[in-house]
């Protein structure tokens, strides 16, 4: 296995196909709200469809994760491309007939794709990158996807106006870009595919039976629980940041765009650099702890803020919360999963994603209730949980 990221051809091809796919997905993100409004679907129904789609996503994570060692890591990844293209076809179909039904299928296929890709990224990196370079590689990949997801919406918006607001053509272009992303994926399947030996231990039923053992494994059960509480904590406040800014501080849309740009710029460079430092120091826990502490301070400053200039500083802290957590916890869990069993790493990642999504499910409802009681309550409640999580993290071992 090559130690240098740039000499590791499977990872280079993987980054190429993932970057193009990210560009394709983000291509329609800026016009997506206008597309939804054009279908004349009421927001209650829209919310119900998204909830249904999310529930399906939760229960597909584990079955999807069992595919990787069985049929091959990159062949499994092909499924996500098929799901994306299917979703685009259903988006187009919704313009012409049965908009509600077609849109529902489009959303379901999109979330099914997310369930596959989110597990695939860490599983592939774990398989092809040594532990000491893993957080750097995960951070580098995340940085690149942010770059492409930042550029693509501007192009999509420009073409949207040039094409006389034609949603059909925009989704068709997205499909064509997805097809381009298949080229490096074909190379991966033909030259670098790895399929575990088809022994009984890799059977789907056997893998499902292994889930309780994975959850109970001493090096995984604590980080699973911490990750679930963290996901629950942020789900309570996560969807109310922009509502709070717009309603309580009268922040303008252009200022919200600047905040998003600040966070992305820091993340583009920070995800890779923090991952690199973590790899060199061979430390993970300290970064997770710092992330929670920064999260506590950013939220306390947030509820005390009185103008948008203070929010700019807070958003910088929020960016560091993200880059200190995202690649580090993925690397940490993959390393602990390898100690349990290399062949069950994809399944472990699937279990992690499943547990996180389950933990997040009630967060929006609780956060909404707290916000209606007092707009600051969701953020205060998150702070309390982050304080508890910080103490729990100190018990972890690298």
Image: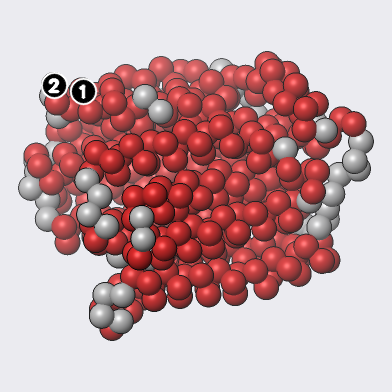
Number of numbered labels in the structure image: 2
Q: Is residue 319 above or below residue 155?
A: above
The alpha-carbon separation of the residues under discs 2 and 1 comes to: 6 Å
Q: Which residue is mark 2?
A: 373
Please provide percent x and percent y for residue 61. Answer: 59, 37
Please provide percent x and percent y for residue 313. Answer: 24, 48
Q: Residue at x 54, y 27 (%)?
A: 355
Please provide percent x and percent y for residue 91. Answer: 41, 60
Q: Residue at x 59, y 72 (%)?
A: 179
- Look at the numbered disc 2 and give the secondary structure of its residue: helix
Relative to the observer, which residue lies in front, 207 or 139?
207
- Look at the numbered disc 1 and give the secondary structure of its residue: helix
Q: Which residue is mark 1?
A: 369
Relative to the observer, which residue lies in front, 355 or 79?
79
Q: Quadrant of residue 352?
A: top right
Q: Quadrant of residue 35?
A: bottom left
Which residue is at the far bottom?
162
Circles 2, 1 touching at the beta carbon (< 8 Å) = yes
Neighbor class of circle 1 (other Cα within 10 Å; few <14, some 14-19, many 20+) is some
């Amino acid at each position: 296995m090559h130690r240098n990221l740039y000499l590791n051809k499977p990872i280079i091809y993987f980054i190429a196909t993932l970057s193009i796919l990210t560009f394709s997905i983000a291509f329609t993100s800026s016009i997506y709200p206008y597309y939804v409004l054009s279908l004349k679907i009421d927001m209650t129904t829209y919310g119900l469809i998204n909830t249904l789609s999310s529930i399906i996503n939760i229960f597909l994570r584990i079955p999807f994760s069992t595919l990787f060692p069985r049929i091959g890591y990159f062949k499994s990844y092909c499924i996500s491309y098929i799901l994306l293209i299917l979703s685009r076809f259903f988006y187009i179909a919704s313009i012409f007939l049965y908009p509600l039904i077609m849109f529902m299928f489009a959303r379901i296929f999109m979330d099914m794709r997310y369930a596959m890709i989110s597990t695939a990224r860490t599983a592939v990196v774990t398989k092809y990158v040594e532990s000491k370079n893993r957080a750097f590689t995960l951070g580098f990949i995340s940085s690149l996807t942010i770059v492409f997801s930042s550029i693509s919406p501007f192009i999509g918006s420009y073409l949207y106006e040039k094409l006389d607001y034609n949603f059909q053509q925009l989704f068709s272009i997205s499909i064509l870009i997805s097809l381009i992303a298949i080229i490096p994926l074909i190379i991966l399947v033909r030259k670098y595919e790895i399929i575990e030996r088809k022994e009984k231990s890799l059977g789907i039923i056997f893998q499902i039976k292994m889930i309780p053992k994975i959850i109970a494994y001493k090096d995984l059960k604590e980080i699973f629980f911490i990750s679930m509480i963290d996901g629950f904590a942020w789900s309570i406040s996560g969807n109310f940041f922009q509502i709070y800014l717009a309603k309580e501080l009268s922040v303008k849309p252009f200022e919200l765009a600047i905040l998003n740009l600040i966070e992305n710029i820091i993340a583009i460079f920070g995800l890779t650099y923090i991952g690199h430092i973590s790899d060199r120091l061979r430390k993970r826990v300290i970064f997770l702890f710092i992330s929670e502490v920064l999260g506590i301070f950013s939220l306390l400053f947030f509820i005390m803020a009185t103008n948008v200039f203070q929010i700019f500083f807070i958003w910088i802290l929020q960016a560091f919360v993200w880059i200190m957590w995202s690649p580090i916890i993925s690397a940490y869990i993959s390393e602990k999963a390898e100690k349990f069993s290399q062949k069950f790493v994809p399944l472990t990642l699937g279990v992690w994603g499943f547990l996180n999504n389950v933990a997040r499910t009630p967060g929006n409802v609780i956060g909404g209730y707290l916000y209606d009681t007092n707009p600051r309550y969701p953020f205060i409640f998150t702070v309390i949980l982050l304080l508890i999580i910080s103490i729990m993290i100190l018990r972890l071992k690298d």
